[in-house]
Image: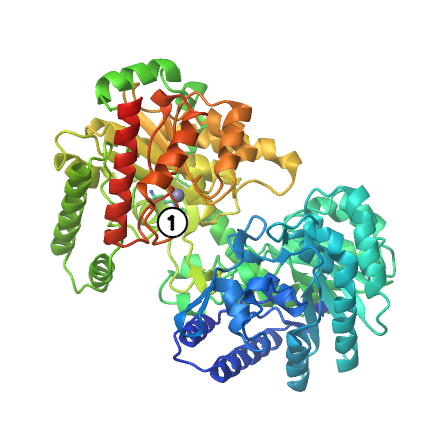
Amino acid sequence: MSIKSTILGFPRMGSDRQLKKLVEAFWAGKATEQELAEGSRALRAEHWALQAARGLTEVPVSDFSYYDHVLDAAFAAGIVPERYQQLDAAGVQAYFAMARGLQDKAIGVDVPSLEMKKWFDTNYHYMVPEIADGQRFALSSTKVVDEYNEAKALGYAARPVVLGPVSLLALSKPAKGASSKPLDHLAGLLPVYVELLGKLAAAGAEWVQVDEPILALDLDAAVYRPLFEQAYGALAQVAGLKYLLTSYFDRLGDNLAWAAALPVHGLHLDLVRGGADLDAALETIPADKAISAGLINGRNIWKADLGKQLAVLRRIVDARKGAAPVWVSSSCSLLHSPHSLRPEAGHLDEETLGWLSFAEEKIEEVAVLAAAVANPGSVQAQLDDNAAKAASRRQSARITRPEVQQRLAGLDRSAYERKAPFAQRQAVQRAALQLPLFPTTTIGSFPQTAEVRKARAQFRKGALGKDEYLKFLDDETRKCIEWQDQAGLDVLVHGEFERTDMVEFFGEHLEGFVFTKKGWVQSYGSRCVKPPVIYGDVSRPHAMTVDVARFAQSCSPNKPVKGMLTGPVTILQWSFVRDDQPRSKTAGQIALAIRDEVVDLEAAGIRVIQVDEPAIREGLPLRKADYAAYLEWSVDVFRLATTGVGNATQIHTHFCYSDFNEIFTAIKSLDADVITIENSKSDLKLLGALEAHGYAAEIGPGLYDIHSPRVPSVEEMAARFAALQKYIPAENLWANPDCGLKTRGWPEVRQALENLVAVAVAARRSA
Ligand code: GLN
Ligand code: ZN
């Protein structure tokens, strides 16, 4: 039998982030629109060629995007808010203005971008379309058809990918002032899809992949089933096309029964994260529909266990008895995987290399699985090699540290508890710290100036010696502390000049982590991140921040300096995590390392310690039924990290990037002494949560948005601060910005913080 091998999408950036460079050159006026288009075309051709060469029988097309696929889908349907309509819609000006805003005095334009939001529980971010009352839709781009034609002309069996109409609207938000909901507009949107799909049919497409990732969420069937039936009933009118309906990142669960009955020709199953669907899927999916088996994990970097996945594939093939096609595919788009392992040869050791699989290698895994079923025996060597590598990983002495495993397993509940309840700790800390009412502080980082970045880069290249670099950091830290002191801040920070981001610094100091050379994945637009790889048991061979903190404290004889650490959940969330033990266990190991650091900081005389967990919300599972289990262990590991100290040591934590209301109860159970939390962009939301759930400990809702160079005035922050006092008892309220200041420049930081201190000082006077 023949079996199709394919993937749901390929990373767009290129092996050397060519797309990033191309797009950024275009933005900077250093490349023309034509150069952008041609460079992108070449990149697509290269990516199809490598997919075919590595064994795919069908390649996805229009998975490519200049910026974001949700933006592409909105743009193609003519969902262009009013404020961009003055711009050139045919060219890319309006498109990029929606992506990143446009400020151009010459043409008198100053428009902000669309809102950016996390793509499900990944670290990719999409642009949120806005749907107005009376929204009109019109097919405004033929990107999908053009890219299909491009692939076809090059001789590939190509399957266009489109974001499905229901998900497109469900991921949108109402335009400002709109009273209608995006999903109310489905009937208006469908003709655009029908027109586009008609063009694809006319161009010769056979299968079209329609992504409806919202099917992995809890959906109210009474609402969504009719919407899906309406949408796919309309799409079914287009003659000559077959639809592969996909969802990913979780099980279809309750949605499976009705999704399987939609008038589509195939269903994709994410069998990595949604394996629980399989039995029901084999019973429910009608015999004439194709099953696309998502067997290769698109979201991690480990070699698949091909033996195990082959058994799953065989089960599907046997169950379908040849009645309808079975495809082998990736669990989701490979957008979330780095491009290729090739640049890692010579950078990573042979053994580690043997455990990994990036997008290019994942394609080979797909092809091997398909071949193993189509021609049993034809890929025995590859299967044997895969099994050998898996065995090497299981048996490697580098992975397991018995002392770490035993320590974690041997903990009793007291390791997760402070020595006294908050009220008692608060009294002790007040006596010890002697802070004024409304203490002022910052979240940790100060501007990462060109000078700071240059010194770090030179140190890494070896152009700056270690001693000189450390001296440079000390000087920056001292200046930063002195400035904070003079500005009147109460709890100071060292400024984080030694760190690029929140995870890398810790990963570099902990055992169990490796760093790739080119393991980039797209985070949003042209921005890529290179997450560290956690391959083994995590331990802390030596203290990581104690020297820096001790030095910073020595520069501030009178005021406490906060120790600054990243929490276990955030380190986990922003890394590629080993898949051979539960995430909770890996998080527990990181927590132990952080706990030791916290205790060492305390012993070094640091009396305030902040453990940041901005990513705790993003780790939340997609399905509500799974929330409790996640929250239980994520709260536990934070507590494990922070409860080793005495009552007088004040533990802070910090949250930003998302809406925390849903997990506010969990945030309370972290039992931190002080939380600082992003607030300035959504005043009411946080206060609503405080009101609904109550909050007894100390809290500093951010007084201004640090994402903009704009300096907030005393008046506006004072107004916000006064509003906060209605919800938070004065003795528990802190004054601080929303988040760290590393992306800002010193001039605006100075002004903004001086204003912030003025607000607190004035509030003290009138209290
Ligand atoms: N301490 C970190 C900083 O100030 C926190 C960053 C964050 O919350 N994203 O940069
Ligand atoms: Zn933050």
Residue occupying the point 65% across, 56% down: 131
Q: Percent position (x, y) of residue 490?
A: 23, 31
Q: How many marks?
A: 1
The single residue placed furthest to the bottom in the displayed view is 153
Judge from the rendering whether residue 138 lies leftward or rightward of residue 702; answer left or right. right
Relative horizontal placement of residue 743, taking residue 626 as reference (left or right): left
Residue 478, above or below 322: above
Give the residue pinned by disc 1.
513
Could you tell me which residue is drawn at 39 percent across and 74 percent down? Answer: 28
Residue drawn where x is 66% and y is 55% of the image: 309
Q: Quadrant of residue 169?
A: bottom right
Give 593 or 512, whichever is nearer the viewer. 593
Q: Amino acid at mark 1?
A: Phe
Q: Quadrant of ligand 1?
A: top left
Image quadrant in which you'd find residue 544? top left
Camera-nearest residue between 78 and 415: 78
Residue 327 at x, y percent in the picture: 73, 64
Label 1: how many residues lie within 10 Å, few (<14), some (14-19) or many (20+)? many
Residue 7 visible = no
Above or below 121: residue 414 = above
Question: In the rendered view, does 255 fall on the left or right side of 751?
Answer: right
Residue 525: x and y, percent? Answer: 49, 63
Which picture quadrant has residue 637? top left
Does the rendering let one see residue 155? yes
Residue 621, horizontal then vertical, whole percent = 59, 41
